[in-house]
């Protein structure tokens, strides 16, 4: 049977979104744009939005799209990194700002589907949770960062102590995306302090239901002056977790974390390149019709230079990201390439988006243009999953260790 192409996947996926997902979004009306309807009074996502996301995930699962990029061993189609990146890039290029669009919930992501990290789950947990993830019924949160442990995970202080067939977790997590309305957490705790202090391991990964006794959402973290948010601060106070809910071996949580964060980085690269392309298209269309000083904006050399800079940075971004994805498909770790792509693409996409807003002038910052949410997204992306400065640190370490070759 002939393998399905990325273009064929996108065409089918876009048709599904334009018919099924658009109907759900239309039903919710201005709920996506009125903060008082989008958020609850306590800052969490409104129940209508939570239910709509689940409805879209489940419809996508039934249509066969949701788990296309999940491993075959977990019930997915097992499509590769290159196609994953191409589809996400195409999705964001077509639909623009991702923050308040249901279209961006049609594909399984790190904590919404049976992705690779679930291969570390023990049989009982896997049998219980993975089928529900594959049907789009559940959503989770990847809770690793802490108030004093962001880019440097070795500063983590959350502890897990073995107690018979259970573990007792105590600690605090921060910047846990989607956690305020999640059904479960994938979280990490230090279980071997000596190994952890020596930076040899000692970290263990756990599945924690949001209903677990002693678990609490302490506060919602609001950004960009929003009245709500999807990140939060969590606390674990003597939370009892069965050993059956452990992912991976005790003290071997970092490999599990890397599989989760690796998928996040691929998703983000596709999202931000597509989003920057969307903004560039808005700027180009506007510059063709907007006239100043007797001629269209596109006939001014300054505007031509800005559009040309966009093209250069978008082209370089795609080459870097797709090269990394190709290496992953060949079974290479591509850690240096991932860090370089992460460092360059996030900064370049932000410049492209900001330049495009500048071309639109006052319209670029108006609600009518719909660009402000995308700008927010790209600004956050320069910090999340490892800031640019941390990526440069990693690149230098790979270089000095002889693990980065440019030939």
Image: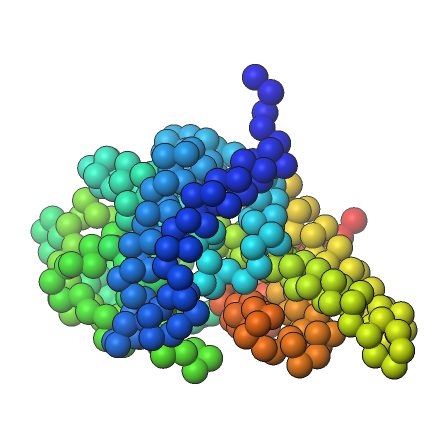
Displayed quadrant of residue 304: bottom right
- Which residue is at 35% across, 68% downward? 38
Q: Nearer the viewer, residue 321 or 149?
A: 321
- Location of residue 311 in the rendering, given as x and y in whole percent from the top left corner: 78, 60
- Which residue is at 13% across, 66% downward? 214
- Location of residue 350 in the rendering, given as x and y in whole percent from the top left corner: 64, 69
Q: Nearer the viewer, residue 202 or 80?
A: 80
Q: Nearer the viewer, residue 115 or 205?
A: 115
Left or right of residue 121, residue 301 in this image: right
Displayed quadrant of residue 61: top left
- Which residue is at 28% across, 45% downward? 137
Residue reaching furthest to the top: 1
Whether residue 81 appears in this view of the structure is no
- Location of residue 402 in the rendering, given as x and y in whole percent from the top left corner: 67, 55
Whether residue 56 appears in this view of the structure is yes
In the rendered view, tell whether residue 127 sits above or below residue 166: above
- Location of residue 257 in the rendering, given as x and y in whole percent from the top left corner: 40, 54
Q: How many marks?
A: 0
């Amino acid at each position: 049977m002939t393998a399905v192409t990325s273009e064929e996947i996108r065409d089918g996926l876009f048709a599904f979104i334009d018919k099924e997902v658009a109907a759900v979004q239309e039903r919710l009306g201005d709920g996506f744009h009125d903060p008082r309807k989008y958020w609850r009074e306590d800052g969490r996502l409104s129940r209508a939005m939570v239910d709509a996301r689940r409805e879209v995930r489940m419809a996508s699962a039934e249509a066969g799209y949701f788990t296309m990029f999940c491993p075959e061993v977990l019930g997915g189609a097992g499509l590769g990194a290159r196609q994953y990146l191409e589809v996400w890039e195409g999705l964001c290029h077509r639909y623009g700002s991702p923050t308040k669009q249901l279209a961006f919930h049609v594909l399984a992501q790190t904590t919404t589907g049976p992705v690779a990290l679930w291969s570390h789950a023990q049989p009982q947990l896997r049998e219980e949770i993975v089928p529900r993830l594959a049907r789009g019924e559940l959503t989770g949160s990847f809770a690793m960062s802490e108030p004093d442990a962001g880019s440097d995970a070795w500063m983590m202080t959350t502890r897990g102590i073995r107690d018979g067939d259970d573990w007792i977790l105590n600690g605090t997590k921060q910047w846990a995306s989607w956690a305020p309305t999640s059904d479960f957490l994938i979280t990490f705790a230090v279980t071997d302090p000596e190994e952890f202090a020596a930076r040899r391991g000692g970290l263990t990964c756990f599945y924690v239901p949001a209903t677990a006794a002693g678990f609490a959402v302490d506060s919602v973290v609001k950004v960009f002056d929003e009245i709500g948010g999807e990140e939060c601060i969590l606390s674990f106070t003597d939370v009892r977790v069965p050993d059956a809910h452990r992912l991976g071996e005790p003290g071997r949580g970092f490999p599990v974390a890397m599989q989760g964060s690796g998928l996040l980085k691929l998703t983000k690269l596709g999202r931000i390149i597509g989003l920057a392309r969307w903004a560039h298209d808005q700027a180009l269309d506007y510059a063709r019709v907007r006239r100043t000083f007797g001629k269209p904006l596109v006939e001014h050399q300054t505007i031509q230079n800005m559009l040309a800079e966009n093209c250069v940075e978008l082209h370089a971004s795609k080459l870097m990201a797709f090269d990394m994805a190709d290496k992953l498909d060949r079974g290479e770790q591509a850690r240096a390439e991932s860090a370089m792509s992460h460092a360059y693409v996030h900064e370049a996409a932000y410049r492209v988006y900001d330049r495009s807003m500048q071309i639109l002038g006052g319209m670029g910052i108006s609600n009518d243009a719909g660009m402000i949410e995308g700008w927010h997204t790209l600004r956050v992306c320069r910090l999340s999953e490892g800031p640019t400065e941390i990526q440069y640190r990693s690149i230098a370490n790979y270089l000095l260790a002889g693990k980065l070759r440019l030939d």
